[in-house]
């Protein structure tokens, strides 16, 4: 089978094209002046600039974290450009008709038509291209329900009170190195507010695309679900195939007020680099949500892209009876490295959390689960269940599990299960003997392994995720 | 159908891990026939099934295998399967999370594609699958469960027969399908096989014991020993073996000084 695995390396990345779009891009480099320029480009109020500068000052005092099971060269932050936007966006197109058709074609090629008539009914999309939001669809329909869904750069102007109140309330500026950097230089992203008692009438989604060379993408997403409301949010991302590494450092903050529920799903397909590990996105992301009384936050992620993934979507279970969930599939192949997992911080009574993590390693990749479950003294009768399964394809990859458990409340219960398995020759032989070709067999076995997570995804995404695994594994057996 | 051969195996030699296991095996199977292959442990019975189906690591070093007029020795595992060769496993493996239905549909469609047919509609497939599960006495809920996931030994074997019913192969090889089965399960397996006997489909039943042959009546019984068929006969040979055991094989070899010398040196 080893020989067959070697062929895995001849894979294709379908989103690897570059769009010919004239952009206005800052020269590489990072200092206070660059941050002032970003803020000026967005015509930001003083309070926003001050917030950025404060974060920048903090970041300069911080150091890159080195505790993850990852290996990468020192990133030179002066080599990166911190802002890039299509020129056609400079005069803010008022409607889709005014948007550069090349931009629309790019999204269409990625399978995300932005013309509302062609879209899947029931999904509103915010399309972020390099540093700016290009289009947000179905806004009128959402406004009828009182739902706010817009680029965060617009929310700063239109809803300053909401932004001021919640931005940085879940992930503080100094939370970690990459979060601090994001606070200083974030360019765009989505803002969502669901009013009290409203069930958001459609799925909301943001599609991130990196196009420009040598730019970093630093997006910021803030979702606030007020009391008793519900929202399901999807996030997708791709980037062109290039030999250089590109940095993506995002921050996502979720606030679920009393009795609210947020379901956040990600299909991450940034360019993973080639089989020798050249190129690919460095994906350093901070995602965290806070749950008030009886609230629920559910993270589902399918991570197939990026050269490096460093990502731990977490829940702070502050309110009594609140619920946190984390469902993850992380696939690494070639020389990809992933260190991903979650943190469940139990503060309130009767809080519950579930962690289901599926790691799949192929080629010469390394895949680590890192998770923390903390039961604080006040977390009476809190419960956690964790299940971590690793699947190895071939004999040159690695799977690692780093579970941390801190229990300071004797009535809390923490359960942890972990397994490691291989796609066995016996399984492959059975499938082939029944007439399936080996590639179909491997993708079926892997899909079966991921089933518990896929069933948590909204349907269209589940199909996409399944296909993505199929493409990713294409040629993984001979 | 009388003179046509479904399977011709001539002078088949094969090795596993550099060790010669099959050493010149001959077998002719006509359409509709049931051949039983018996013999002591280590004779190469299971190897024969794996070699026919093309499993990796089972290397053919000589001889030929012709299925339905086609030389299959260079074909991939899945090509042989689609050409009508089915192997029912002695120890069916589990595939967690992949439902039986999904697995079977993919297998049936792969067979149909090879025959230039469109995939079955989900509705038609479901109907066929339900009938098949009924035949082998597996409750329909097993169709929704993962392939062999958490099945008992008997359920796994019945699941194999269900797959056979759906794929409608030309040649079925049953590898020790009776091992670990109680009488009831044995009967279900045998009934499944017998229901598929239509005068065209052929069976090779590999077994250590005679009892399965009480339920599946073979046309021929062959004794495999040290990689070769050393004796063939009709169904009565199986009864003879049951009474005598396999010790006479050793005597037969002892009568051959060259064979004996080899045995000692091993």
Image (tube, coloured by chain):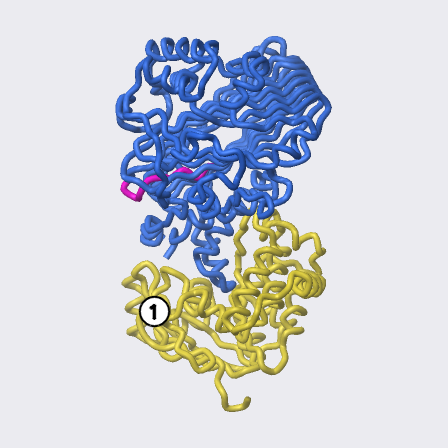
Chain colours: A blue, B yellow
Q: Vertically, is B35 above or below A310? A: below
Q: Vertically, is A173 above or below A209? A: above
SS at mark 1?
strand
| Magenta span includes A271 | yes
Rendering coords of residue B117 (x, y %): 56, 72
Residue at the location (52% across, 83% down)?
B30
The answer to whether A52 appears left or right of A385 in the picture is: left
Rendering coords of residue B214 (x, y %): 64, 72
Question: Which one is in front, A223 or B239?
Answer: A223
The answer to whether B9 appears left or right of B137 in the picture is: left
| Magenta span includes A236 | no
Start and end of the magenta stretch? A268-276
Residue under mark 1: which chain is it in? B
Q: Where is residue B127, by image quadrant?
A: bottom right
Q: Where is residue A59, by image quadrant?
A: top left
Quadrant into which the C terminus of chain A falls: bottom left
Q: Vertically, is B131 above or below A71? A: below
Q: How many marks?
A: 1
Question: Which one is in front, A176 or B168?
Answer: A176
Name the residue beneath numbered marker 1.
B60
Q: Main secondary structure of the magenta part?
A: loop
């Amino acid at each position: 089978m080893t020989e067959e695995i070697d062929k895995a390396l001849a894979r294709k990345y379908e989103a690897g094209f570059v769009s010919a779009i004239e952009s206005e891009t800052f020269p590489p480099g990072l200092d206070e002046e660059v941050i002032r320029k970003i803020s000026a480009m967005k015509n930001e109020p003083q309070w926003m600039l001050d917030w950025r500068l404060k974060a920048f000052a903090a970041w300069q005092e911080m150091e890159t974290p080195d505790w993850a099971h990852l290996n990468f060269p020192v990133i030179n932050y002066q080599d990166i450009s911190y802002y890039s936007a299509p020129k056609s966006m400079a005069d803010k197109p008022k409607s889709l008709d005014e948007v550069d058709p090349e931009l629309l074609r790019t999204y269409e090629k990625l399978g995300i038509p932005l013309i509302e008539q062609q879209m899947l009914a029931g999904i509103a999309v915010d399309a972020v291209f390099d540093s700016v939001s290009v289009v947000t669809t179905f806004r009128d329909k959402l406004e009828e329900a009182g739902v706010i869904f817009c680029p965060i750069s617009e929310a700063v102007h239109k809803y300053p009170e909401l932004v001021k109140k919640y931005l940085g309330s879940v992930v503080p500026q100094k939370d970690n190195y990459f979060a601090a950097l994001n606070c200083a230089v974030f360019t765009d992203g989505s803002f969502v507010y669901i009013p009290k008692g409203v069930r958001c009438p459609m799925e909301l989604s943001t599609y991130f695309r990196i196009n420009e060379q040598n730019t970093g993408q630093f997006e910021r997403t803030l979702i606030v679900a007020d009391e008793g409301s519900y929202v399901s949010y999807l996030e997708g991302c791709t980037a062109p195939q290039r030999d250089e590494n590109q940095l993506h450092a995002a921050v996502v903050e979720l606030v679920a007020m009393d009795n609210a529920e947020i379901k956040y799903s990600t299909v991450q397909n940034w360019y993973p680099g080639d089989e020798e590990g050249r190129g690919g996105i460095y994906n350093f992301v901070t995602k965290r949500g806070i749950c008030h009384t009886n609230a629920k936050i559910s993270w589902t992620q399918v991570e197939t892209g990026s050269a490096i993934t460093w990502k731990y979507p977490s829940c702070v279970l502050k309110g009594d009876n609140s619920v946190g969930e984390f469902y993850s599939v992380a696939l690494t192949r070639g020389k990809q490295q992933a260190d991903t997992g979650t943190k469940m911080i139990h503060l309130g009574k009767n809080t519950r959390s579930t962690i289901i993590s599926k790691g799949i390693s192929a080629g010469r990749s390394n895949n680590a689960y890192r998770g923390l479950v903390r039961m604080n003294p006040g977390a009476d009768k809190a419960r956690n269940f964790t299940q971590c399964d690793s699947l190895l394809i071939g004999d040159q990859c690695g799977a690692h599990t780093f579970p941390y458990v801190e229990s300071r409340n004797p009535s809390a219960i923490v359960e942890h299960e972990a397994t490691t398995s291989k796609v066995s020759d016996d399984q492959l032989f059975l499938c082939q003997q029944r007439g399936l070709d080996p590639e179909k067999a491997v993708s079926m076995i892997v899909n079966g392994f991921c089933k518990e997570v896929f069933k948590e995804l909204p349907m269209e995404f589940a199909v996409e995720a399944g296909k993505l695994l199929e493409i990713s594994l294409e040629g993984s057996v001979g | 159908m009388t003179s046509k051969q479904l399977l011709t195996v001539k002078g088949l030699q094969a090795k596993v891990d550099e060790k010669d296991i099959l050493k010149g095996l001959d077998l002719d199977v006509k359409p509709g026939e049931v051949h039983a292959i018996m013999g002591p442990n280590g004779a190469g019975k299971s190897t024969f099934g794996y070699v026919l189906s093309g499993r990796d690591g089972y290397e053919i070093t000589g001889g030929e295998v012709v299925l339905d007029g086609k030389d299959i020795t260079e074909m991939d595992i899945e090509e042989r399967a689609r050409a009508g060769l089915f192997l029912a496993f002695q120890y069916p493996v589990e595939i967690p999370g992949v439902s039986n239905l999904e697995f079977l549909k993919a297998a049936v469609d792969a067979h149909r594609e090879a025959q230039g047919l469109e995939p079955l509609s989900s509705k038609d497939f479901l109907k066929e699958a339900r009938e098949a599960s009924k035949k082998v006495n597996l409750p329909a809920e097993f169709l929704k469960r993962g392939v062999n996931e958490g099945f008992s030994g008997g359920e796994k074997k019945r699941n194999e027969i269900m797959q056979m019913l759906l794929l409608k192969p030309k040649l079925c090889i049953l590898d020790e399908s009776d091992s670990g089965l109680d009488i009831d399960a044995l009967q279900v397996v045998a009934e499944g096989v017998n229901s598929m006997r239509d005068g065209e489909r052929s069976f090779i039943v590999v077994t250590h014991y005679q009892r399965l042959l009480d339920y599946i009546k073979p046309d021929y019984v062959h004794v495999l020993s040290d990689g070769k068929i050393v004796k063939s006969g009709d169904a009565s040979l199986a009864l003879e073996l049951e009474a005598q055991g396999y010790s006479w094989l050793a005597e037969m070899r002892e009568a051959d000084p060259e064979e004996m010398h080899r045995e000692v040196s091993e």
